[in-house]
C-alpha cells in the first residue's frame, strides 16, 4: 500500500531525523520540530557574497564559492553582524538524505520575515531557490540579505524552515486576504531607517520604539513609500484545520507596486479555537516598490493556499506555546 501523500507531520519529521533523512551533528532541539515544518539552524561558516547565485545542474554550492563570488568569510562562533545591503551565504547545521518520494520546500520563519531579513535556501545542483528535489542527498545553505535592520547572528539561530512533501504540491483551496486599515488605532508599523542592531537570540529584548513607528489610516488609506518596510494585518481571521497546512502567496504580481509576502508557512492548528487561536489574523510583511502606492482598507493583498497533511499531527500549532497564535497586528518575537 502506497504511503499517503501530502505534507509530513511532526512525528514523521522527528522519525525522519532518526532514520537519517534529516542529518545534523547535534540532536534536534526543543521546538525545532513544528506541526508541519522543521526549523533549520545556522552552522558556523558564513560568506559575504558579491552577488546571489544558483549553483546549477551538476555543480555543488562549494564549487561556486570562488574568488569571483566570495568577498570574505565570517565565523559565527561568538556572534557576527550581518549588515543591511549585503548578501551572505551561511551553512546550515542540517542536511538531507531524502527518499526518492520526498521533496522539500523552504520558507523564512515568521520572525525572519517580520525583521525584513530576506532568506532563500539553496542546495547542491539546484536551479531554483527554496526547492529541494525528491531524493536529494547533501548539505543545505541559506542566502541571507538583511534589508532594514542589521542582525547579530550565532550558530544555532533559526531563520528558515522546511516542509517535507510526498506526492507533489496538492492545492486544496485558496482564500484571498485583504488588508485591515480601519481608522483609529495604529493600522500598522513602518520600520525606521538607521535603527540599532537586532540580536537574533534576544526574544522580547528590543524596544519597539527604537525600530518602528506607528502608521495610522484616518481615512482607511495609507500610502506605501518606495523601499519602505511595513507590518500590517489581514482583515480576515485565519484558521488552518489539523488535517491541512497552508502557505501565504502573493495574490498576483500585477495588483500593485508592493510585495506582501516574506514568510508564509501556516501550520495545522493556527487560528483553531481548540488550540487557543480564535481570531488569529495573518500578519503581512509589505515592502513598497518603485513608486508611491495607495493601499485602501479591504484591498486584496495576498492569498492563503491550503494543502493536505500526509498524516495527523501530534501537537497542533499553539498547543505547546507559540509567539503568534491568536495574533492581531504583531511585530516579531524580538520586540517587547
Image: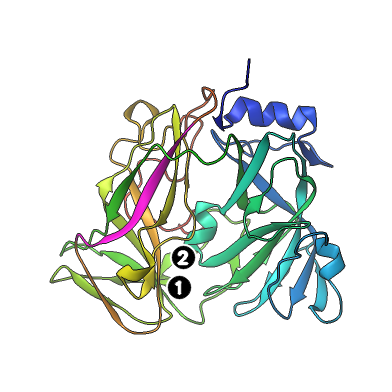
Give the residue pinned by disc 2: 207
Q: Which quadrant of the figure contains the N terminus?
A: top right
Q: Is mark 2 on a helix, strand or loop?
A: loop
Residue ID at (33%, 55%): 329
Q: Which of 13 and 325 is in front in this view?
A: 13
Dot 1 crowding, Cα within 10 Å, few <14, some 14–19, many 20+ = some
Q: Is residue 329 left or right of residue 72?
A: left
Q: Position of residue 66 (x, y in %)?
A: 86, 75
Q: Nearer the viewer, residue 239 or 153?
A: 239
Rendered image quadrant of residue 6: top right
Q: Is mark 1 on a helix, strand or loop?
A: helix
Q: Is residue 302 within the magenta segment?
A: yes
Give the residue pinned by disc 1: 210
Residue ID at (44%, 27%): 243
Q: In this view, does 122 lie to the left or right of 298?
A: right
Q: Residue furthest left?
A: 219
Rendered image quadrant of residue 90: bottom right
Q: Position of residue 92 (x, y in %)?
A: 75, 53
Q: Which of 26 and 78 is in front in this view?
A: 26
Dot 2 crowding, Cα within 10 Å, few <14, some 14–19, many 20+ = few
Q: Which quadrant of the figure contains the C terminus?
A: bottom left
Residue ID at (78%, 46%): 95
User: Which stretch appears magenta?
Assistant: 298-308
Amino acid at each position: 500500500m502506497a504511503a499517503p501523500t501530502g505534507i509530513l507531520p511532526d512525528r514523521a519529521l522527528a522519525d525522519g531525523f532518526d532514520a537519517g533523512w534529516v542529518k545534523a551533528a547535534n540532536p534536534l532541539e526543543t521546538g525545532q520540530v513544528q506541526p508541519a515544518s522543521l526549523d533549520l539552524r545556522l552552522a558556523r561558516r558564513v560568506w559575504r557574497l558579491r552577488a546571489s547565485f544558483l549553483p546549477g545542474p551538476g555543480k555543488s554550492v562549494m564549487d561556486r564559492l570562488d574568488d569571483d563570488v566570495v568577498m570574505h568569510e565570517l565565523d559565527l562562533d561568538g556572534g557576527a553582524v550581518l549588515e543591511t545591503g549585503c548578501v551572505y551565504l551561511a551553512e546550515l547545521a542540517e542536511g538531507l538524505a531524502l527518499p526518492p518520494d520526498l521533496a522539500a520546500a523552504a520558507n523564512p520563519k515568521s520572525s525572519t520575515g517580520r525583521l525584513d531579513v530576506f532568506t532563500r535556501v539553496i542546495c547542491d545542483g539546484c536551479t531554483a531557490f527554496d526547492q529541494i528535489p525528491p531524493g536529494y542527498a547533501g548539505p543545505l545553505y541559506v542566502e541571507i540579505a538583511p534589508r532594514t535592520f542589521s542582525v547579530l547572528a550565532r550558530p544555532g539561530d533559526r531563520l528558515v524552515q522546511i516542509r517535507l512533501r510526498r506526492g507533489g504540491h496538492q492545492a486544496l483551496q485558496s482564500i484571498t486576504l485583504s488588508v485591515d486599515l480601519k481608522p483609529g488605532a495604529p493600522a500598522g508599523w513602518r520600520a525606521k531607517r538607521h535603527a540599532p542592531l537586532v540580536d537574533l537570540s534576544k526574544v522580547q529584548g528590543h524596544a519597539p520604539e527604537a525600530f518602528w513607528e506607528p502608521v495610522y489610516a484616518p481615512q482607511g488609506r495609507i500610502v506605501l513609500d518606495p523601499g519602505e518596510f511595513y507590518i500590517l494585518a489581514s482583515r480576515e481571521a485565519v484558521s488552518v484545520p489539523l488535517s491541512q497546512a497552508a502557505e501565504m502567496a502573493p495574490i498576483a504580481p500585477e495588483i500593485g507596486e508592493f510585495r506582501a509576502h516574506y514568510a508564509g508557512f501556516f501550520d495545522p492548528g493556527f487560528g483553531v479555537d481548540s488550540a487557543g487561536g480564535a481570531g488569529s489574523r495573518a500578519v503581512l510583511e509589505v515592502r513598497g516598490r518603485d513608486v508611491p502606492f495607495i493601499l485602501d482598507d479591504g484591498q486584496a493583498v495576498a492569498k492563503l493556499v491550503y494543502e493536505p497533511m500526509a498524516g495527523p499531527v501530534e501537537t497542533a500549532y499553539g498547543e505547546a506555546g507559540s509567539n503568534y497564535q491568536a495574533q492581531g497586528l504583531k511585530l516579531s518575537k524580538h520586540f517587547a
